């Protein structure tokens, strides 16, 4: 199968969850993960599956000073069987069920269109590249000023709606798309950043009800008021779940 076939699913890590890695792949993945833990990137977190370290969940926080500020963007990374000779497969999971794209490099299908990962213009994959390099490239897209324009308010809304609220709800519901370690960290980050989310939404309440062209097929107007209510409801559920988990741990 052609790994880079644009018409197929060879790019998709979900199609290769049970692929058996080579010994070389396992050795290199262990090293990449250990190196990342030794010197982690600010705002980027990784969670390898306990029973399959070649399947890694990555969480990228939207950087401060951008419309993505505070967003919790979930990526699934699956290392190919002959990694590092070929690149890992990467899917962005934060798409509102295939309805929202936060960047031209993030397709609604979940495909990440980076030159490192396939035949796109730009730097190509090399065996010397690592998990950290892939994560740096992913994080860099959230600093792309090409997308900072008069749509910033709507990007802020969709970031809070999809990359915060949807992500947190999935964690509360023990979504199988998220590992247990990832879910716990999502709830922790939400609780830490809750004040920021309130400030972002509250500062845009005056836009509620206004029509706006958007990249989302379902959202055509600003909806900050219902988003504020949703955030407050999630805060209660997150606190209850975290306190219940802490109580169980103390038993």
Image (cartoon, helix red, strand yellow):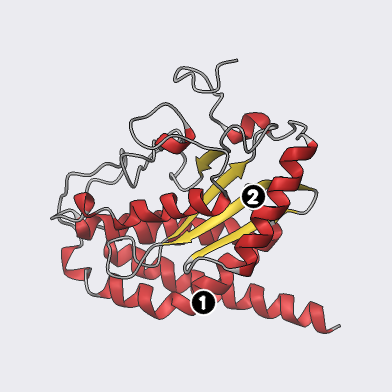
Report how far apart the C-alphas of labels 2 and 1 lie in the structure: 24 Å
Q: In this view, does 48 lie above or below 69?
A: above
Location of residue 244 in the rendering, given as x and y in whole percent from the top left corner: 71, 77
Location of residue 117 in the rendering, given as x and y in whole percent from the top left corner: 48, 35
Location of residue 218 in the rendering, given as x and y in whole percent from the top left corner: 32, 41
Residue depicted at x 59% and y 78%: 239
Quadrant occupied by the C terminus = bottom right
Q: Mark 2 points at which residue?
A: 56
Which marked residue is nearer to the observer: mark 2 or mark 1? 2
Quadrant of the image occupied by residue 145: bottom left
Residue depicted at x 31% and y 38%: 217
Quadrant occupied by the N terminus = top right
Helix, strand or loop status at disc 2: strand
Q: In this view, does 229 lie above or below 122?
A: below
In this orientation, does residue 23 appear? yes
Residue depicted at x 36% and y 77%: 196
Q: How crowded is mark 1: few (under 14 residues within 10 Å), some or many (20 or more)?
A: some
In this orientation, does residue 112 appear? no
Q: Mark 1 points at which residue?
A: 191
């Amino acid at each position: 199968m052609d790994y880079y076939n644009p018409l197929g699913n060879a790019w998709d890590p979900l199609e290769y969850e049970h692929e058996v890695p080579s010994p070389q792949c396992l050795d290199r993945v262990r090293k990449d993960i250990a190196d990342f833990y030794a010197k982690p990137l600010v705002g980027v977190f990784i969670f390898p599956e306990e029973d399959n370290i070649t399947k890694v969940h990555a969480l990228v926080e939207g950087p401060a000073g951008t419309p993505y500020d505070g967003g919790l963007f979930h990526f699934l990374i699956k290392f190919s069987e002959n990694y590092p000779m070929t690149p890992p497969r990467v899917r962005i999971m934060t798409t509102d069920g295939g309805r929202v794209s936060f960047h031209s490099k993030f397709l609604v299908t979940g495909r990440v269109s980076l030159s490192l990962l396939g035949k796109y213009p730009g730097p190509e994959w090399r065996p010397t590249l690592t998990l950290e390099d892939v994560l740096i490239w992913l994080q860099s897209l959230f600093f792309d000023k090409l997308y900072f324009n008069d749509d910033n308010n709507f990007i802020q809304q969709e970031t809070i709606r999809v990359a915060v609220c949807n992500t947190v709800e999935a964690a509360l519901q023990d979504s199988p798309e998220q590992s247990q370690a990832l879910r716990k960290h999502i709830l922790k980050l939400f609780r830490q950043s809750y004040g920021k989310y309130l400030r972002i939404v509250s500062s845009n309440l005056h836009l509620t009800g206004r029509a706006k062209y958007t990249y989302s097929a379902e959202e055509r107007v600003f909806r900050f008021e219902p988003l504020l209510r949703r955030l407050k409801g999630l805060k209660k559920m997150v606190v209850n779940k975290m306190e219940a988990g802490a109580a169980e741990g103390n038993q």
